[in-house]
Image: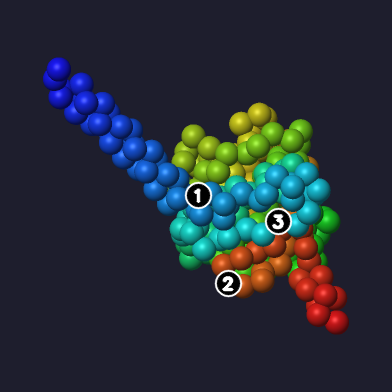
């Protein structure tokens, strides 16, 4: 009789146990981050407002949340990105946001409550494709004067970094800004207006 079989079996058990603990540990680290980005399935099904944790979005980065089956992008704009918005005004179809594509509280140049954060439905207003986020510039393959924005791969519509469409594009309107409100510096509720909070408090 040899002890080898026993030792091997024990070793295998310890290796397996370590792997399980390791995987569980990794999941524990990853899960809070994912949970902060994704609404619950129940909330999605109901079309309920979605709480989005925007604390981990880095400058220049865009993160997608889902609200009522639509991809809602949250872009954290850098100072340069914000500055680019006033430089493209003359090239835009609706620079002052006269069309009803955003709540009244986002009818401004940045189309936002806080200039740093753009909250927008990621759907082209031509036939509904998903435009690509193209923050880098120059990008002569998109436009000789490109300062960053969105490019729709379906039929070539271009939008600035506030989702305002450029002149002469197939897309007729700016992309839609959904209702949203901040409950803190790091959490935004998509699907509710700021006035909803006041009504609750009354
Ligand atoms: S769907 Fe975007 S340009 Fe046609």
What residue is rendered at 74% in x and 35% in y? 128
- The x, y position of residue 59, in whole percent, is 46, 59
What residue is rendered at 69% in x and 34% in y? 129
Judge left or right: residue 129 versus residue 18.
right
What's the distance in space between the residues labelled 2 and 1, CA to CA?
Answer: 22 Å
Occupied quadrant, residue 151: top right
What residue is rendered at 80% in x and 49% in y? 47
- The x, y position of residue 161, in whole percent, is 59, 53
Give the secondary structure at mark 1: helix
Occupied quadrant, residue 17: top left
Q: Which mark is drawn over residue 185?
A: 2
Q: Can residue 148 be seen in this view?
A: no
For disc 1, the neighbor class at 10 Å (few under 14, some 14 to 19, many from 20) is few
Instruction: Kindly report which numbered mark, 3 or 2, lies closer to the viewer in this rendering.
Output: 3
- The x, y position of residue 142, in whole percent, is 53, 37
For disc 2, the neighbor class at 10 Å (few under 14, some 14 to 19, many from 20) is few
């Amino acid at each position: 009789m040899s002890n080898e079989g026993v030792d091997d079996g024990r070793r295998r058990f310890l290796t397996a146990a370590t792997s399980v603990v390791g995987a569980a540990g990794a999941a524990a680290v990853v899960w809070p981050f994912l949970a902060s980005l994704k609404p619950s399935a129940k909330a999605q099904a109901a079309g309920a407002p979605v709480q989005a944790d925007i604390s981990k979005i880095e400058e220049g980065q865009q993160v997608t949340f889902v609200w009522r089956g639509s991809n809602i992008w949250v872009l954290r704009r850098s100072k340069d990105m914000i500055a680019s918005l006033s430089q493209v005004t003359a090239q835009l179809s609706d620079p002052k946001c006269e069309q009803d594509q955003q709540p009244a509280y986002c009818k401004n140049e940045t189309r936002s409550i806080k200039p740093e954060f753009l909250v927008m439905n990621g759907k082209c207003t031509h036939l509904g494709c998903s435009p690509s986020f193209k923050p880098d510039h120059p990008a002569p393959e998109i436009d000789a004067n490109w300062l960053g924005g969105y490019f729709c791969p379906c039929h070539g519509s271009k939008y600035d970094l506030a989702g305002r469409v450029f002149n002469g594009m197939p897309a007729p309107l700016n992309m839609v800004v959904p209702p949203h409100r901040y409950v803190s510096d790091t959490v935004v509720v998509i699907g509710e207006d700021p006035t909803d909070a006041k009504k609750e408090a009354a």
